[in-house]
Amino acid sequence: MSICIKHNKYYCRFQINGERHFYLCNGATTKQQAEKIENALKYKVQQIQNGVLPKENKQNKVKMLTLFNLYEVYSKQNNKGYSKDIYNLNILRAYFKNDYVNDITINKLEEFKGYLLNDRHLSNATVNRYRAMLSKIFNLGIQNKSITVNPIIDLKKLKVKNIKTRYLTLEEEYRLYNAVSKTYQYLKDIITCALQTGMRKGEILNLKWSNIDMEYRFIELLETKSGKSRRIPISDSLYNIFNTLPVTSEYVFINPETNKPYTDLKKSFRTVLKQAGIQDFRFHDLRHTFATRLAECNVDLIVIKELLGHSKIDTTMRYAHAVPKRKIEAITILNSYREQREVIKNGYRMDTEKMAI
């Protein structure tokens, strides 16, 4: 039996005569209860396959758009990245606009995967996120008793290559600042904020003056990816920037032409990177640079975790791996430990021999 629990609800997954099924074990509060419901569902499926019971046509009547609307309500109430969800949801709506749930076969899903890869030129990781989103949408349909099967379980994830943690060298940083001063001057302060705080791009662009305490010199972020607030101390260089920026809006970094915060920096940031001769670098890598430099200075990983706002220390551990010097130091310590043990061992042997004499 294959019983799993998600969001405090029990689900069962099984296969009969080549047909895969995934159901919510409605009403189950223990694994034993879920197993009983699974047995009942298996029996029902067998009866349908044998022609004893008529096939269920419930999913024939449910449009994909109905499930998308259901997910939109869920996302608005539960997800911090609601605006991004809506963008992705609109892609799904456009592609599956005329489809019923019963139309969603493995071939249909594979075609959608190809559309994302070949027509929209998305990465494997991004395609996998669409797969996860669709799975959540179907599960919501099951929880709301609109449908009975999640067809996404047959769609395999794409393999994702491990990405090297990229960070700025001091020489690259010099070239970046030189390029940004010649073209997009407003980017200079934003880049400094990223390098001095490790904040995400969205956190920087949505930073408000009300989040900044100039007296005690810290930034307090209330809306974060993890859902937990965090405080970041303000360095001297960033303190000077905040002191010189004009306060004409509730937001810190604003477009002077619109008096509104910048919505994106892709074009301008890509331009300065090209001018600076910096390759394979994203704005998010400024955050990696912040963390890697702290790790190189032997700052405790717990402190780095708190500054970055990671929910798990495992995520922060990558920055320890990015510092080769620490690996060399670790091996050196291990080698010296072995040598010390040999000295102690030899000393003990000599003492034993003396006692024997």
Image (cartoon, rainbow, N blue to C red):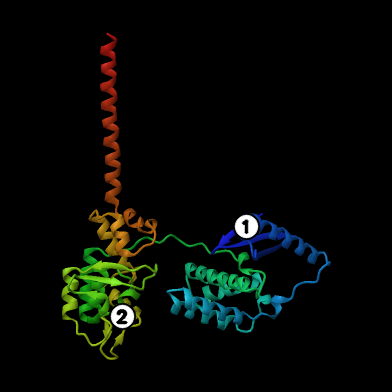
Measured from the top left, where is residue 67 in percent x and y? Answer: 59, 78
Residue at the bottom extreme?
257
* Cα–Cα span, label 1 and label 2: 50 Å
Identified at 55% across, 63% down, the residue is 8
Query: In what element is the residue under mark 1?
Result: strand
Residue 203 falls left or right of residue 88: left
Residue 89 falls left or right of residue 306: right
Identified at 70% across, 80% down, the residue is 61
Measured from the top left, where is residue 245 in percent x and y? Answer: 19, 82
Q: Which mark is residue 268?
A: 2
Residue 263 falls left or right of residue 107: left
Looking at the rendering, which quadrant does residue 24 occupy?
A: bottom right
Image quadrant holding the N terminus, namely bottom right
Q: Which mark is residue 3?
A: 1
State which mark lies toward you, 1 or 2.
1
Measured from the top left, where is residue 286 in percent x and y? Answer: 29, 68
Identified at 16% across, 80% down, the residue is 244
43 vs 267, nearest the viewer: 43
276 vs 213, nearest the viewer: 213
Looking at the rendering, which quadrant does residue 145 occupy?
A: bottom right
Is disc 1 in contact with disc 2, using a CB cutoff of under 8 Å? no
Query: In what element is the residue under mark 2?
Result: helix
Q: Which mark is residue 235?
A: none
Identified at 24% across, 81% down, the residue is 186
Looking at the rendering, which quadrant does residue 98 occupy?
A: bottom right
Amino acid type, residue under disc 1 in the picture: Ile
Measured from the top left, where is residue 289 in percent x and y? Answer: 28, 64
| Residue 254 drawn above or below residue 15 | below
| Residue 120 drawn above or below residue 49 | below
Image quadrant holding the C terminus, namely top left
